[in-house]
Image (cartoon, rainbow, N blue to C red):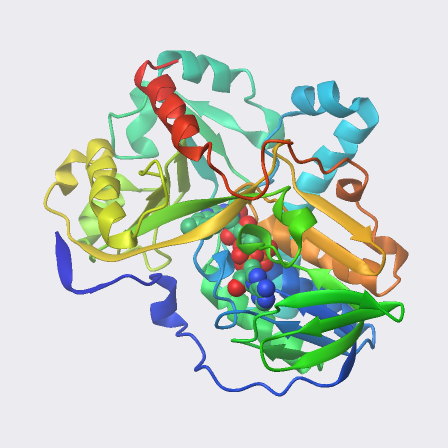
Amino acid sequence: MFTSDFKTEPYWWDAVPREPAEPYDIPAKVDVLIVGSGYTGLHAALKTARAGRSTLVLDAQQIGYGASSRNGGQISNSIKLNLLELTKKFGTDMAAKISIEGKASRDYIESFVKEEGLDCNFKVVGRFDGAHTPKQYEKLAKTAGEDGSFMVPLADQHSELGTDFYYGGIVRPNHASIHPALYHRGLLSLVRQAGAGVGGNCKVTSIKFQNNGYLVETPTQSVQAKRVIIATNGYTTKVTPELQKRVIPIGSYIIATEELPKDVMDRLMPKNRMLCDTRKMVFYYRPSPDRKRILFGGRVSLNESDPVATAKPLRNELIRIFPELKKVKISHSWSGFVAFTFDKLMHVGRQKEMYYAMGYCGSGVGMASYLGMKIGLMAADDATGQTAFSEIPFLGRLYYQGNPWFMGPTISYYRLHDRLSL
Ligand SMILES: Cc1cc2nc3c(=O)[nH]c(=O)nc-3n(C[C@H](O)[C@H](O)[C@H](O)COP(=O)(O)OP(=O)(O)OC[C@H]3O[C@@H](n4cnc5c(N)ncnc54)[C@H](O)[C@@H]3O)c2cc1C
């Protein structure tokens, strides 16, 4: 089942190996201290550093270790709720603002990559969402037309995807693809050029408010910061207990296949689209940027598991969609944490001089970039940092203190829902 060089590391790290862990000398004082070196933290750092604020980014692990170098590289409008659902929750005006910012996040990453000249395989390839039941096809059809989306009936499905698994689907042409780790590396290099420090293996262990700023400690060093930005998303811990109680960390798992013949790739994924389906236990997949492999992700275990154990059930799901891959070998299997929220939306906020942006609900490539940029502007006192995501309440639940004990039962319910083809 595994290739001889099978790895339990992201496929993306083959092109962008992690930087070696070297001791990092933390300065005594900075204007802005950022916890977390993913897209949120680095986009924030780019804004504060370019605005002339001395900026330091610290990560508990290697730089970019979190979801930002592990994800599927699919770029969407990032908002899980549709306009009707948003309107019911927040009223017409706020719903419109959120929806506009969803689109803005998608456009922001495209213009950022172009303007900064980042070499990271960004391509507007569109996404095909397969309907796993006829009812879901009808449901998708009601949304066709939005942002140029169009239906693909079952009879034409092979023009999009070499499978009979779905009942047709929808194409969303403005969705894009990226190489997540190349994107992260390009961004990191811009942040360093802007003069910010970025230290890996520097776990922040406490953040104390004092003298109108913060004393931030790691196990061996400390720094006085005027402002702090929390950019820890699915890796948020009790260092920020009020945030930990508001985000639910959920592991997401991906496999990469061995290299496949060109004719197979051309038959299975003729249009190079990003791919997804309508199941509640959603699977997301795509060709690798060189079109030689399939990267296939989703959630296949009730509780968190290790990537060796999850490779087999993920491969089984891949083969259900593409039976001709029944002999395929797996070269990489890995996982990472996303952060869900109770209202399925991302949140931005400020308490005293501490800022945060998180809760991307599994769609953070564009949105973490965009809200990282916004929070950086806010921390640099730039009024254009304003965003609707700081105007909606960020609520937890009394029954949740940071340990997602309800994940197993929730996933069992979702599986049943999918099995009954609801
Ligand atoms: C497997 C997987 C697939 C995904 N696929 C997609 C996709 O296709 N499309 C999409 O839009 N989104 C996807 N996502 C989600 C997306 O990757 C994330 O939303 C986004 O990368 C979040 O970026 P971030 O910078 O906020 O957090 P992260 O990149 O997760 O970074 C958080 C960092 O905080 C650090 N940290 C935590 N605590 C501390 C501390 N105390 N001290 C110092 N550092 C600390 C962590 O070490 C970590 O590196 C996926 C995520 C995963 C895991």
Quadrant of the image occupied by residue 369? bottom right
Image coordinates for residue 325, horizontal then vertical, percent:
15, 42
Residue 84 is left or right of residue 171, and the answer is right
- Left/right of residue 174 with respect to residue 207 in the rendered view: left
Whether residue 320 is visible, yes or no, is: yes
Q: Is residue 246 above or below residue 408?
A: below
**Figure disc tally:** 0
Q: Is residue 95 above or below residue 370?
A: above
**205 is higher (above) or lower (below) than 107:** below
Residue drawn where x is 47% and y is 50% of the image: 337
Residue 110, position as x, y percentages in the image? 61, 55
Q: Nearer the viewer, residue 222 or 114?
A: 222
User: Closer to the camera, 71 or 159?
Assistant: 71
Question: Which residue is depicted at the point 82% across and 72% down?
Answer: 51
Q: Residue sitting at 65 percent across and 72 percent down? A: 57
Q: Above or below — where is 355 with respect to 325?
A: below
Horizontally, residue 302 falls left or right of residue 250, namely left
x, y percent for residue 286: 36, 46
Q: Which of 316 and 109 lies nearest the eye of the viewer?
A: 316
**Where's residue 160, x and y in %?**
35, 34
